[in-house]
Image: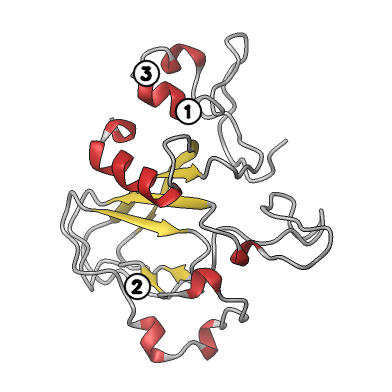
Amino acid sequence: MLLDIPAVTEIVTAIFESPNYVLRAASGDFCLPGAVEYQPLHADVNDWRSDERTPFSAYHDPRGQISIRDLPCPYVCVNFLPQDVTRLNGPTRQIPGTQNSRVRIPRLDDEPEWMRLSTVCPAPAGGIMIRDVRAWHGGTPNVSDSMRAIPNLEFYAPWFREPIVPGITYEDYRKLSEHAQRLVRHCVADSSETLVTGPTLRAP
């Protein structure tokens, strides 16, 4: 259902200037009541460094001249908000303009107060948040009495690929709309394979 929301299709098509983007994964995050620490700022995609340091990484210029941060937006995350996001229930903090920054991301101890307060809230249930995953972001404390969950879809630009781990069975793929099938075509397990679930950061 989330793959077939017209507004999402329109916006992501505009971002990539093409309808030929593909699904990387469907995932999400959650923040339980009582999680009172800040998550360190981070980006969800980085430049390749080595097999040991970045076994599942994004971009490698063998000349060492261009960073993933020099490219047009290669990869977006569409967050769906099933509940109101408030300043109390662990809103995401998002640091504007950092998708192109080569400056080192500050550690929690060094993070300025304005970054800690740069939260995406209030945001109503039913809203969506679309992020360039290169931008710095992180979770904040949940001092409410309920869980804050954010399911998502992650999309690659037509010209960008990392290894993609299969996330849908062939049987379920056949139940999707034609539009959704086109988006998930790289995420489908072979019809003879059993879908492998669990941690998948180390892609084949």
The residue pinned by badge 2 equals 141
Tell me whether circle 3 and circle 1 mark residues in contact (CB < 8 Å). Answer: no
Residue 94 numbered mark, or none? none
Q: What residue type is labelled 3?
A: Glu
* Position of residue 78 measured from the top left corner of the image (x, y, whole percent): 37, 49
Q: Earlier in the sequence, mark 3 or mark 2?
A: 2
Residue 35 point in image, percent of width and height: 37, 68
Helix, strand or loop status at disc 2: loop
Q: Left of 15 or right of it: where is 142?
A: left
Q: Nearer the viewer, mark 3 or mark 2?
A: 3
Residue 179 position within the rendered picture, expressed as x and y whole percent measured from the top left: 36, 24
- Residue sitting at x 33%, y 59%: 32
Task: Indicate the amino acid at tag 1.
Answer: Val
Of all residues, the one furthest to the top in this rendering is 192
Q: Tell me what residue is drawn at x 69 percent, y 61 percent.
A: 47
Comes first in the chain, label 3 or label 1: 3
Tag 3's secondary structure?
Answer: helix
Residue position marked by numbered label 1 in the rendering: 184
Q: Marks 3/1: CA distance?
A: 10 Å
- Residue type indicated by callout 2: Pro
